């Protein structure tokens, strides 16, 4: 697995950036650039299960099964990916999932002079590195 790093500077306090990234309505807006129709079902509380979903073929949900590994409000959130949702069905045990289950997606929020730097570190399997390098900058610009 390879760890990818991205960052963006946003001219707003870290509390506003945090709330915008995690609130249901605004989460849907900023993730639209790389996951049309994307949303989450669940909670951002530490230890909680959360599904990241988008409509797939035939209207069946596709996405990720995850848990919140860490949540330090306005500072850091860590998402641990456990599996996938395929055609509306959760899969956390197949051989395809075992190769990357446990991958982390971490967000660090640092405020300086009224702006916020968001640092993103995400584990990625080799076959998706190129795709994620292309995809991730899009929502960060929005």
Image (tube, rainbow, N blue to C red):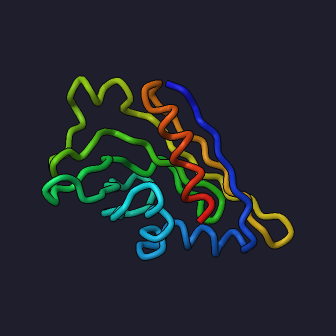
Report the residue at 69% width, 68% height from top. Answer: 14
Report the residue at 53% width, 56% height from top. Answer: 71
Seen in the picture, residue 80 relative to 60 is either above or below; the reply is above
Would residue 23 appear left or right of 13 to someone viewing this image? left
Q: Quadrant of residue 95?
A: top left
Report the residue at 13% width, 56% height from top. Answer: 58
Image location of residue 122, percent across then percent down: 54, 40
Q: Quadrant of residue 24?
A: bottom left
Image location of residue 78, percent across then percent down: 52, 48
Q: The C terminus lies in which quarter of the figure?
A: bottom right
Report the residue at 51% width, 44% height from top. Answer: 105
Residue lying at the far right of the rendered structure: 113
Seen in the picture, residue 75 relative to 84 is either above or below; the reply is below
Would residue 139 appear left or right of 61 to someone viewing this image? right
Seen in the picture, residue 14 relative to 117 is either above or below; the reply is below
Q: How many marks?
A: 0
Image location of residue 47, percent across then percent down: 40, 52
């Amino acid at each position: 697995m390879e760890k990818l790093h991205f960052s963006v500077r946003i001219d707003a306090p870290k509390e506003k950036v945090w709330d915008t990234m995690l609130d249901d309505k605004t989460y849907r807006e900023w993730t639209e650039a790389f996951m049309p129709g994307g949303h989450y079902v669940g909670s951002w509380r530490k230890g909680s299960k959360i599904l990241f979903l988008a409509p797939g073929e035939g209207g069946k949900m596709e996405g990720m099964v995850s848990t919140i590994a860490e949540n330090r409000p306005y500072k850091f959130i860590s998402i641990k990916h456990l599996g996938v949702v395929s055609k509306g069905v959760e899969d956390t045990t197949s051989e395809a999932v075992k190769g990357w289950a446990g991958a982390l997606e971490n967000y660090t929020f640092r405020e300086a002079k009224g702006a916020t730097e968001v640092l993103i570190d995400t584990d990625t399997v080799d076959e998706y590195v190129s795709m994620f390098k292309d995809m991730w900058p899009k929502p960060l610009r929005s």
